[in-house]
Amino acid sequence: MSERPGPTGAAPGEHRDERGPVLRKGVGVPTSGWFDPRGRALGGFAFAANRVTGLGLVFYLYLHLGVLSLLLRGEGSWSDFLRIATSWAFLSLDVLLILGILYHGLNGIRVALVGSGIVADRQRALWWSLGVIGTIALVVSASHIYGSR
Amino acid sequence: MATIRTRPEGTARRTSPRPPGGRSWTATTLTGLGLLVLLAIHMVANHFVVRSVGGLRSYHQILEYISNPAIFTIEAIFLLFVTVHAMLGVRGVLLDLDPSPRAQRWIDAALVVLGLGTLAYGYLLIGTLASRA
Amino acid sequence: MSTMGTRRFRVYRYKRGDPGWRFDLFVVPVGARTTVLEALRWVQRHLDGTLALRHSCLHASCGTCGVQVNGREALACVTPVEDLGATITVEPLANIPVLTDLVVDMREFVDRFPDEIAITRRSEPLPGAEPPEGIDAYERFEDCIECGLCLSACPVSATSDGYFGPAALAAAQRLLEEPRGVDPERILGWADDPLGAWRCHAAFECTAACPSNVRPAERIMALRGALGRRAG
């Protein structure tokens, strides 16, 4: 738990006494409050995991563009890459990628339906039901990917 | 109306005038929904169609794949959607750093530049590969 | 209170003029049904009379005694110590400036509500309701007891003091449901702000923390639905 005086919060023209400390949930830095899993309920975990997978996928987007750039160098470069990409470790990273995509996508469906007010009061049921779908999809994908080796 | 006010009129926290905030959320949601279809197509095509380890395509298989006009169009739209969704998502995360309005404008500008750069490079990449087939 | 043992209470302390905050440790005798508030009051009476805390009704209807217990928001008057572990950490609510010890400045909470929200409102007979024979009328009370637990739990409020917060947004949505003379367009215009309804990330921590069935997150989502229909 970190604390520091924040902005005054006073309305324009209003004088406020010195502001006392403000407790913030967070890991060190107050703006990490969304990342702190301590004392959170299901929705908080889901939100944090959505962000973590989202940021991971952004990183992957640029990694992917970088890897695809090997194609510009010709068949030899790509074949060298495929030799690495078909190893057990790399295939496991592929499964991890699919996990991230499934989580972010299916949780995104939940956020879209709930956040637009369409199904505002069913967020728990959505999380669990989409979670079952995602788990099945992940198991099928993983068995296909590992089974192809 | 039976209302008793215990706070003087006009003392509520005032927010500075800002444009409505729903556009970013709407755009993120719409691109996200589009990605459900586009990303599914992309993943299936590149991991679950070709009979190889991990479903990965060889060099020539990729050239053949991307030179198909329908595939090229789908992948181009996919790149657009994923870039917009990614930039908006990063913007949402950076918003929680509580930047000043000036810093927010710089962040928005930087993300637009990054997004356009990503699209430019991506289209250059798939265009070059398609032309080699 | 009949005792079943003791618990250690790690209590946040801060007084104006102090260089910073600290935690004080108190060993408190507890019984099977001892609440956090009872334990803190015992500390006040027997160990440290300078410990400042707020409470009133003792039965979760006033919302005054909101604190964080082991990192989770709770009303101290109805939180039993039995299942809280050997060491219980009590802190003031998060995201609201501390005045002293466990007391936060609720002006910062109340000021987030739009002007159209009356701070108190005389209860009125509920129009359209058909009470059974012998009952003259139903009166509708607001569920929200303005305890601030939702604001403390909200991960977005942890990142920005400008965010309107779950309580204010939920109150706005209640006004949409039952305007009582308020112009709904003014409420929607107030909520349609990057720091208003659109800043919520649907974490639902506010609903999890709410002791009074307000379900602020669901109300914010309904508010967004109303804003979407207004735009479309």
Image: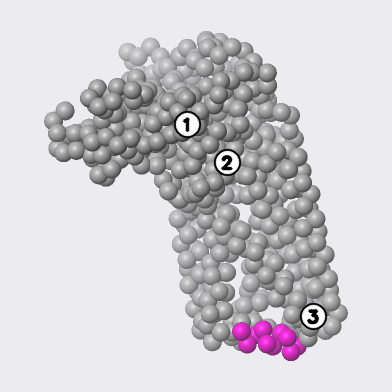
Q: Within 10 Å of the Cα at label 1, are there few (<14), some (14-19), or many (20+) other Cα atoms?
A: few
* Element type where label 1 sits in the image: loop
Between tags 3 and 2, which lies in front? 2
Question: Does the magenta segment cover residue A82?
Answer: yes
Residue C219 seen from this side: no
Q: Which chain is mark 3 on?
A: A
Q: Amino acid at mark 1?
A: Pro
On whether disc 2 and disc 1 are found on a single subunit, the reply is yes
Residue A38 image position (x, y, % from top left):
42, 48
The residue lying at 43 percent from left, 34 percent from top is C21
Instruction: Quadrant for residue C33, please give it.
Output: top left
Q: Amino acid at mark 3?
A: Leu
Question: Does the magenta segment cover residue C212?
Answer: no
Q: Which residues are magenta?
A: A75-84
Looking at the image, residue A80 sits to the left or right of residue C65; the answer is: right
Mark 3 sits on what residue? Answer: A72
Query: What distance separates the C-alpha of mark 3 from that of mark 2?
Result: 43 Å
